[in-house]
Image (tube, rainbow, N blue to C red):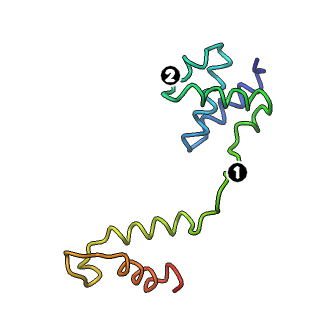
Amino acid sequence: MLGIKEMISLCQEQAHLRSFSPRVRAKIVLFAAEGLSNEIVAARLDTPRQIGSKWRKRFAVARLPGLESQPRGGRPALFSPSIVVQFKALACELPHRLQLPLSRLFLSEIRREVITQGLLAS
């Protein structure tokens, strides 16, 4: 059962969070504190039942720190999110802006422009 201080802390955290996932995690725990089952919580939040179960268990073991994201496995990203956004914006440019015929914009031209704009070293 949640203590009143933890419940207030969760509500404040939920109110200030900008990201979707932490907000959902906080809601899962708050609904669980109301005694709702994983199935009902999942239906209310439009998430799989297993997600609710996962975050309830993590909260039960570690309390508020259990709701924080854990490092993900796998290879680290090669490019920062801001560079990825710039690459995608460039790829969506009209070819004529890059002095190319309208009928083509190939990866080689995008690569050349990325290097020309200094987004990536050659």
Instruction: Reply above or below: 24 against 110.
Output: above
Q: Dot 2: few (<14), some (14–19), or many (≥20) neighbours within 10 Å?
A: few
Looking at the rendering, in which quadrant would you find the N terminus?
top right
Q: Which label sits on residue 44? A: 2
Instruction: Report the side of 45 relative to 30 (left or right).
Output: left
Amino acid type for the residue under numbered disc 2: Arg
User: Image quarter for residue 78?
Assistant: bottom right
Q: Position of residue 13 (x, y in %)?
A: 66, 36
User: Image quarter for residue 54?
Assistant: top right
Instruction: Reply above or below: 94 against 109.
Output: above
Q: Which is nearer the N-term, disc 2 or disc 1?
A: 2
Which residue is pictured at 65% across the width and 57% down the height? 74
Secondary element under disc 2, as helix, strand or loop, is helix
Instruction: Reply above or below: 93 against 62.
Output: below
User: Image quarter for residue 11?
Assistant: top right
Which residue is pictured at 64% across the width and 31% down the height? 26
Amino acid type for the residue under numbered disc 1: Pro
Contact flag, marks 2 and 1 (Cβ < 8 Å): no
Q: Which label sits on residue 14? A: none
Which residue is pictured at 54% across the width and 40% down the height? 20
Residue found at the very far top of the displayed protein: 35
Q: Position of residue 117 (x, y in %)?
A: 44, 83
As rendered, which of 13 and 60 lies closer to the eye? 60
Instruction: Report the side of 55 relative to 93 (left or right).
Output: right
Q: CA distance from mark 2 to mark 1?
A: 28 Å
Task: Name the residue carrying label 1.
Answer: 71
Number of marks present in the image shown: 2
